[in-house]
Image (cartoon, grey):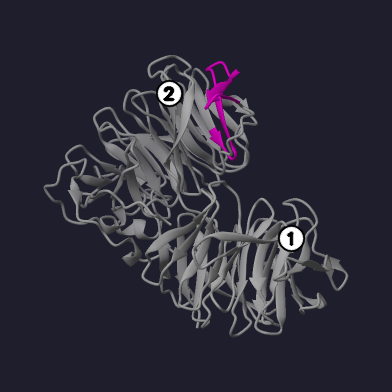
Amino acid sequence: MKSLPLIHAILVILAGAAAGCNPVTPAATAAANPSPTLSAPTDTAFPPTPAAPIDLLGRPGHIRLSDDSAAGYAYRSFLQIPIGTAWGPDGFLYAADWTGRHIVRIGKDGAMDELPLSATIETLEFDGPRGVAFDTQGSLFFNSHDFIFQIDPGGKVSNLTGVIREVIGSVAVSPTDELYYTDRGEKGAVRKWTAPGNSETVVEAANPENLAFGRDGTLYFTQVGQDRVMKLDADGGTAVPFVEGACGFEPCFLAVDPEGDIWIRGINRLSQYSPDGTEKPFVVDGQAYPGGPYMWQTAGGIAFDDEGGLWVASFDSRVIRLAPDEPGKADPKFTLRKVVPGFQASVLDTGAKGELYATDFNDGGLWRIRPDGTADVIADWDWEGRAAVAVDEAGTVFLGMPNGEVMRMETDGSLSVVATVLTRRMVFGGDGMLYAIAGEINGPKRLVRIGGDGSVTELATGIDGVPLGNGEAHISCATDTGLYIFTEADRNLFFVDFNGQGRLIANLGSLGGWRNPVAMTASPTTGDIFLVPHGPYVLYQISPDGKSREIGFRFFGDPWGMAVSRDGRWLYVAESGAVDKVPIS
């Protein structure tokens, strides 16, 4: 059994003065953001000093329910979604943890502490920090979607007035200490902020997101949904393409290395380009990229440290460091180190004693999460990928491994192979038998029953004449009468009995997030189905006859796995870096 690492030191952010910088000009006042609440100042210096550990589970969750209450956490890792990153003057990486609603400071040894900003700045309780940057004087700038804040070297926290915006993407500081930010509004723009509270448009652009300054002062920026990186021309009034096809259509991040090359972090990729736009290969663990074996996953921030090491964050709560084999050498070879392995529960199931079982996509392991929020890893297979998990009435755990083995956990913690079939998700039916959705990731899916003797019986490749298709499919128990199956690509919800016969309950495409991933489960007591589509991030409750209603929102963090407690009181939703606990009884 492998115990989870303890958090080494928790930092407490100093509180700041409750004003902005200076009054804005009349022209900017109408568009300027209102000032959020800041707590009273203290004498604490910045960076903050270690303090007593805090209770992460005690913090309110970002999920809101229909009665305007907040859901909490069954488990929460220290770092959830690192979006913007910056190397600090104190020799630590600063990561803006959006859903965690704090800025996390990370050491090269993996130790983490925090700036618990939501305790100081009220608005961050609802929308956490996204971008982070330092100037040469040691001031820290960070933003949410609506505000930009400054913490000066003495610890004073200020809300910058005169920030004209609809939706703020990120912030960056120029080599001459000028603050720039992106406005992702309908008429998107890169803007420059100057004291006392003035914003001016540098260039208009659709959905600008992240910024970086080259060694020569050239400004580069990304655009959500545009799959390209732009740069400003010599006169600073026009943006021209720098690189096409390096980002994908998700948020894309930038960093500049000591030699002036521009690094681009897109979804599932990392690229290096010289200032003239030529892509340059780089080597990690002896493998040449692009084309090497590491799966970069969804994009988070990137930043270079004081040794030329590149920190690479992901939305799945992990942070790695590409450590240069020869610090200070131009175009070094790198060694990959997992600084923060992160936690992304891909599949959940519950036990009879209120415990929760989660398979971790990031590192490959089975976590057991207790009702008090403590957790340990009770099985460890050390490779990435989704593993299915199902727990029978006696509390025996079964795993569907990424290599196509179905395994049973024995009382001594060992794993025994009981069948060979590639499962995507599994569930025990009301008849006590193990059922699974089987098939390759992009191949045809089928419903199978797995016997205790290792037999695998195919029950259906479609329901009532409608194929299960090649996309992802979810399976859950429909009380003791049968099973529910939901197909992501077509948004079809089926009921099927234990012989593979069934009917279409409803097509749920109207609930949003068409063709994006979905998290789905059902209550073992009522038969109600629960669904969260990626995109709208809304929780729907669907009755057995297909009628739906919205019961929660703000399910940010890319929900993947879901499960309902055996007494039907709690819904668990796995997001990046956490498992949410939602009351549903």
Give the vertical position of 361 relative to 546 (above or below). Answer: above
Viewer-closest of 159 and 474: 474
Percent across and percent down for residue 390 are 60, 68
Percent across and percent down for residue 207 are 55, 42
Q: Is residue 281 magenta?
A: yes
Q: Is residue 35 visible?
A: no
- 494 relative position to 416: left or right: right
Label 1 crowd bin: few (<14), some (14–19), many (20+), radius 10 Å: many
Q: Which residues are magenta?
A: 265-288
The secondary element bearing badge 2 is classed as strand
Give the vertical position of 476 relative to 107 (above or below). Answer: below
Amino acid type at image mark 1:
Ala
Residue at numbered disc 2: 324
Instruction: Identify the image quadrant of the N terminus.
Output: bottom left
Residue at the right extreme of this rendering: 465
Whether pointer 2 and pointer 1 mark residues with C-beta atoms closer than 8 Å, the reply is no
